[in-house]
């Protein structure tokens, strides 16, 4: 049964605003800013992309498309382009990130909106905003959506970039993990709380604190898994297989969503069913203590009230589990 309940007046941590067509999230008390909406506008496009995957609601697609504004085709800019924004109506932004764009394009691909996807991807500038540009691997990934004739080249280029970049990141992470005391596959989903991170952090010296800042975090790994999942399925070169094996070997046992995206079909229906929705988006965080993810910080009464509706992490997992299992 879907937990989606739309409307900004819904009592829930996350809510879908039918006016803006965006999936927002109420800010934690300590993160609220005076004079702001405090509904997570900065990650709204990313969150709406995940919501569109989980629930495939047409209004969510409308919200995603509304975050891409066409410009150019005139005297100043001869070619038409699309400028992304973090939320509907937020024009003039200088900080639209790769994360927002990747998740929104992945959502369109997962739900088969290939015409809209090709239109946006074909006119997406390499410089996404004044602050962020695409990486070479992301550029090739976007070209695949744009209908490039050089499919084999781009698939291999994306995978080669992934092998090199992730190989360095995973090696660095293993070293940093020993320095900071991060331990993988020790805590299960429903048992993890932010205290695992806080208890470690309280014991760190200055060197350990500095080392932790260089850690390749789970939110980047989560986006990498979506990038891998959305690569063409009819062309599987050796580089793709090597990259996939690297990713699945590094993936935590309890990260059911990422395991599914990487082709691990050993995730069971029981594991999916028994998973309980958490305060944060579970699948973008490691459970090794490197990030609090703001889980288990609220009493059970709060969780029963505010996590009843719009359980994005659980419904996204259920949707992808059913989608992948039905393909077998």
Image (tube, grey):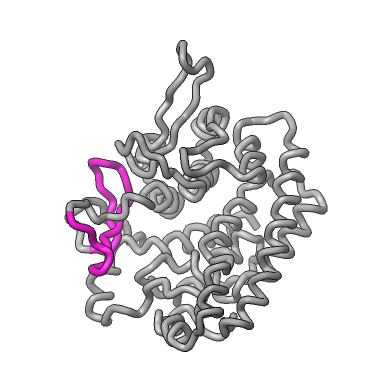
Q: Is residue 318 above or below residue 105?
A: below
The N terminus sits in image quarter: bottom left
Determine the residue positioned at 42% across, 82% down.
198
65 falls in the magenta region: no
Q: Quadrant of residue 252?
A: bottom right
33 falls in the magenta region: yes
Q: Quadrant of residue 225?
A: bottom right
Residue 221 position, x and y percent, is 58, 62
Determine the residue positioned at 67% across, 68% down.
170
**In this rendering, position of residue 30 left or right of residue 136:** left
295 and 199: which is toward the camera: 199
Q: Is residue 43 above or below residue 130?
A: below
Residue 79 position, x and y percent, is 53, 18
Residue 77 position, x and y percent, is 49, 18
Q: Specify whether residue 145 is in view.
A: yes
Determine the residue positioned at 64% across, 66% down.
265
**In this rendering, position of residue 270 left or right of residue 136:** left
Residue 226 position, x and y percent, is 57, 54
Q: Which residues are magenta?
A: 12-34
2 and 174: which is toward the camera: 174
Q: Is residue 275 above or below residue 75?
A: below
29 and 315: which is toward the camera: 29
The C terminus sits in image quarter: bottom right
């Amino acid at each position: 049964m879907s937990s989606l309940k739309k409307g900004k007046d819904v009592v829930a941590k996350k809510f879908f605003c039918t006016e803006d067509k965006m999936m927002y999230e109420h800010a934690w008390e300590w993160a609220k800013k005076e004079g702001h909406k405090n509904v997570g506008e900065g990650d709204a496009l990313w969150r709406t992309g995940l919501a569109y995957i989980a629930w495939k609601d047409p209004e969510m697609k409308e919200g995603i498309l509304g975050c891409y504004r066409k410009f150019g085709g005139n005297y100043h800019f001869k070619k038409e382009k699309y400028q992304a924004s973090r939320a509907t109506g937020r024009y003039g932004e200088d900080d639209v990130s790769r994360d927002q764009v990747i998740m929104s394009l992945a959502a369109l691909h997962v739900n088969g909106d290939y015409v809209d996807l090709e239109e946006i991807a074909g006119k997406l500038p390499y410089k996404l905003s004044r602050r962020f540009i695409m990486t070479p691997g992301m550029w090739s990934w976007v070209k695949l959506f744009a209908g490039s004739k050089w499919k084999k080249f781009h698939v291999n280029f994306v995978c080669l970039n992934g092998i090199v970049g992730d190989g360095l990141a995973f090696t660095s992470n293993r070293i940093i993990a020993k320095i900071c005391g991060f331990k993988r596959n020790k805590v299960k989903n429903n048992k993890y709380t932010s205290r695992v991170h806080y208890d470690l952090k309280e014991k760190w010296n200055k060197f350990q604190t500095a080392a932790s800042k260089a850690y390749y975090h789970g939110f980047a790994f989560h986006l990498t898994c979506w990038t891998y999942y959305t690569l063409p399925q009819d062309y599987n070169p050796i580089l793709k297989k090597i990259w996939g094996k690297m990713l699945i070997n590094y993936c935590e046992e309890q990260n059911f969503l990422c395991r599914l995206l990487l082709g691990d079909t050993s995730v069971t229906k029981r594991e999916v069913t028994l998973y309980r929705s958490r305060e944060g988006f579970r699948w973008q965080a490691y459970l090794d203590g490197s990030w609090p993810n703001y889980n288990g910080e609220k009493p059970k009464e709060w969780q029963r009230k505010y996590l009843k509706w719009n359980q994005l992490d659980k419904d996204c997992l259920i949707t992808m589990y059913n989608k992948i299992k039905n393909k077998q």
